[in-house]
Amino acid sequence: MALAARLVSRSRQLYSVQATLGNGGVTQVRSFAKDAAPADRPPVSGDDLLKGIFFEVKKKFETALGVLKKEKITIDPDDPAAVSRYAQVMKTVREKADLLSDSQRIKYTIETFTKGIPDARTYLNTLQQLRIKSGLIDHLGIEPLMMEALEKIEKDIKKPLLRSDKKNMATLLAEFDKINKKLGFRKEDLPKIEEELELEIAKSELTELKKECVEAMETQLKREEFQDEEMPDVRKLDIRNFL
């Protein structure tokens, strides 16, 4: 079951916002409370709320586990076919268990933590904080370019740019489009970029899973009763036998 829990957690979804940002669970609890207590019903108690959340998570876990028991995964991050297969299995897990993809999780996180922010500068600073907390790196230096575009507009209008200022926000977004084009990004390329992101994540997770399997086997082989055993090829392991 430990390996099963590890694989399910590798989908990065069950506790994605909480794990990444620490206090994201508040939003999920409030959302659950709202769904659990419609206007024509009395409010649910704290115990009932927690029980509901627990059973919802348990249901998602069992659904994901059911997929992993059926689908074969080859632990070989150096094999593109194995990486693609792993990514497809994780996609099936998300679809069956109603979990967010990484791109959906990022969008949800941004919407949750920027809701109610009135000005563009605080919005961009919040995005930067979310990126840092998520462990992502701005390799292309996009953030300084976005902030430079904002500063240019605020200098022209001689005041902070509010998100409710449709005219000047449109100007800012047009500047962002120019930055995207300069860096070679197009809106029509987003599905392909998302697919490449999922494959990169799949390879990273398979690499970590392989490392953990090898370390576990090496630890076992140090025990006296396994002294004469040879290290099995991790690529030949069938994780379904351990679930």
Image (tube, rainbow, N blue to C red):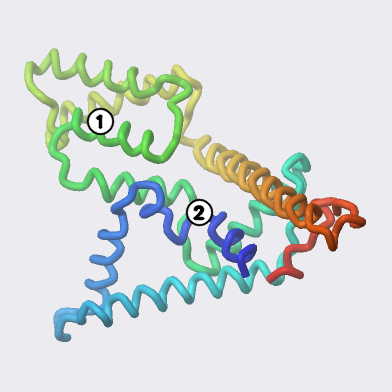
Q: Residue 93's quadrant in the figure?
A: bottom right
Amino acid at pointer 2? Arg
Q: Residue at x 81, y 54 (%)?
A: 221
The picture places residue 155, in percent across and down from the top left corner, at 13, 13
Residue farthest toward the left in the current orientation of the protein: 159
Along the horizontal axis of the image, is 10 left or right of 45?
A: right
Q: Residue at x 61, y 40 (%)?
A: 200
- Which residue is under mark 2? 12
* Quarter of the C terminus within the rendering: bottom right
Q: Residue at x 50, y 36 (%)?
A: 188
Q: Residue 227's quadrant in the figure?
A: bottom right
Identify which residue, 96 or 201, lies in the foreground. Answer: 201
Identify which residue, 33 or 120, lies in the foreground. Answer: 33
Residue farthest toward the front in the current orientation of the protein: 224
The picture places residue 37, in percent across and down from the top left corner, at 21, 79
Residue farthest toward the right in the current orientation of the protein: 228
Number of on-image labels: 2
The picture places residue 103, in percent across and down from the top left corner, at 46, 46
- Position of residue 199 relative to residue 174, above or below, is below
* Quarter of the N terminus within the rendering: bottom right
- Position of residue 158 relative to residue 199, above or below, is above
- Which residue is under mark 1? 125
Q: Tell me the SS state at disc 1.
A: helix
Q: Tell me the SS state at disc 2.
A: loop
